Amino acid sequence: MVRNLQNFTAHEDISYRAQDHQTYAVRFGSEVYDYVVVFQQHGDKPIVDERRHAPHGTPSDITAESRGLPEMALLFLPALQPDYDMKCDGRASWEDRPSWLVEFRQRPDRPSRTFGVRSLKGAYSAQLYGRARLDADSGEILHFEAGIMHALQAIKMYHLYLSISYAPVQFQSRNVRVWLPHIADVYYDYGELDNVVHHTFSDFLLFSVDTDQKIASPKSSDSPGHF
């Protein structure tokens, strides 16, 4: 996956719902974004720059809670694997594809470098546990689930859970096939509200960007990727 990672843009649909503990909806709605992701390498570590642009209106700040979806799979990089206890629970089927089920849990003696939550009060790292389904033939990640191991008491976030389904995207212009997030759901409680955010990605495009250029959407001449 890391070898084939490319700078890409996509069409992103986000729907969200915030409700109180009696399930009364306090806020809900949907947004459409031009979504841009740029991967750069800093030594042996990939750096991800992620941007959203709402072309038809003012974006909601709900997206601030849902950044970092493409790079969650990088948890399995050799440099980050020692942060987790991992075990394989055997073969299983995921959407008619044979796969391996791998469980992971943050080790207490290692730093939390994978996931964090940013709020008006500051940034807080969080320990993760979860499981992933890896394609039995290629090793590509098909599905990823994770949650925080401990509540973040300082910001009254007691639970957070995310689920990401990946799909192969074939970019015809450069003859490369990359597995990227297709559908993602984020569930979390924050203060007195329970929140659900649903992401759908489509119409992928590859593009190039120099380090001294401003990140922007690709030219329309690039060939789209398809599921």
Image (spheres, helix red, strand yellow):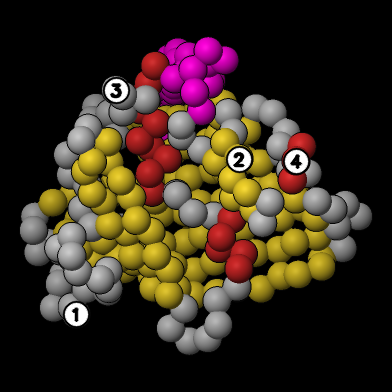
Task: From the image, tell me which residue sits under label 4.
Answer: 154
Answer yes or no: do the residues labelled 4 and 2 have beta carbons within 8 Å? yes
Chain part drawn in magenta: 83-112
Say which label, 4 or 1, has the lower sequence index.
Answer: 4
Q: Amino acid at mark 2?
A: Tyr
Using the image, determine if residue 109 lies above or below residue 12: above
Instruction: Give the main secondary structure, helix, strand or loop, of the magenta stretch.
Output: strand
Determine if the magenta segment contains residue 105. Answer: yes
Real-space Cα separation, disc 2 to disc 1, in angstroms: 39 Å
At 49% across and 23% down in the image, what residue appears?
A: 111
Say which label, 3 or 4, has the lower sequence index.
Answer: 3
Real-space Cα separation, disc 4 to disc 2, in angstroms: 9 Å
Say which label, 2 or 1, has the lower sequence index.
Answer: 2
Q: Residue furthest left?
A: 174
Residue 143, position as x, y percentages in the image: 44, 38
* Quarter of the figure with residue 208: bottom left
Answer yes or no: do the residues labelled 2 and 1 have beta carbons within 8 Å? no
Task: From the image, tell me which residue sits under label 2.
Answer: 124
Using the image, determine if residue 149 lies above or below residue 60: above
Looking at the rendered structure, the secondary structure element under dot 3 is loop
Determine if the magenta segment contains residue 132. Answer: no
Q: Nearer the viewer, residue 176 or 123?
A: 123
At 18% across and 78% down in the image, what residue appears?
A: 219
At 19% across and 69% down in the image, what residue appears?
A: 213
Q: Amino acid at mark 1?
A: Ser
Real-space Cα separation, disc 4 to disc 1, in angstroms: 45 Å
Task: From the image, tell me which residue sits under label 3.
Answer: 78
Q: Which mark is residue 220?
A: 1
Answer yes or no: do the residues labelled 3 and 4 have beta carbons within 8 Å? no
Looking at the rendered structure, the secondary structure element under dot 1 is loop
At 39% across and 16% down in the image, what residue appears?
A: 82
Residue 89, position as x, y percentages in the image: 47, 14
